[in-house]
Image: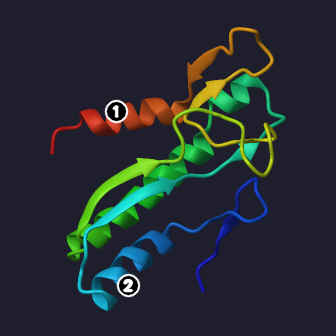
Amino acid sequence: MRESLQANSDWLYIAPFGMYGCVNYIRQKYGNPAILITENGMDQPGNLTRDEYLNDATRVQFFRSYLNELKKGIDDGANVLGYFAWSLLDNFEWGSGYTSKFGIVYVDFNSSSLERAPKASAYWFRDLLQVKH
């Protein structure tokens, strides 16, 4: 059995092999319908320092591994039309308030201006999207 890692939320595990498994299952079981992945991401604890948020190496690895598995599924024929990271900005999470951060852009909720700064994962996405294939 493949190992899954725990994200910050107790209900969220990091299991990139599941991405391939899901799109491949849908392809085989349901006749390969169009798939649009609308949320895929992981959270960090809400009590890190600004630098720890900005240097989100675990999230970069998360997206790299999930997108590699998604590419395998597409290469095997899964009809994936789109993918959206979860989420663009740190925000108020319905179940955990501000104690969990999902965004690729840091939001400082302690500043009156709600300062925003791209995390390493935002720069990783930028670089990924600029590569010509």
The quarter of the picture where residue 112 lies is top right
Give whichever of 132, 107 is nearer the camera: 107
Q: Provide residue 122's location: percent of width, then percent of height.
A: 48, 32
Q: How many marks?
A: 2
Q: CA distance from mark 2 to mark 1?
A: 30 Å
Element under label 2?
Answer: helix
The residue most toward the top is 113
Q: Provide residue 82's location: percent of width, then percent of height.
A: 30, 54
Give whichever of 17, 26 is nearer the camera: 26
Q: Quadrant of the N terminus?
A: bottom right
At x 30%, y 69%, the residue is 72
Element under label 1?
Answer: helix
Disc 2 vs disc 1: Cβ atoms closer than 8 Å? no
**Residue on which disc 2 sits:** 25
Q: Provide residue 133's location: percent of width, then percent of height.
A: 15, 45
Which color scheme does this rendered protein use?
A: rainbow
Mark positioned earlier in the residue sequence (2 or 1): 2
* Label number found at residue 127: 1
Residue 104 shown left or right of residue 49 in the figure: left
At x 35%, y 64%, the residue is 70
Vertical position of residue 112 compared to residue 22: above or below: above
* Label number found at residue 26: none
Give, as a three-letter code, the residue at label 1.
Asp
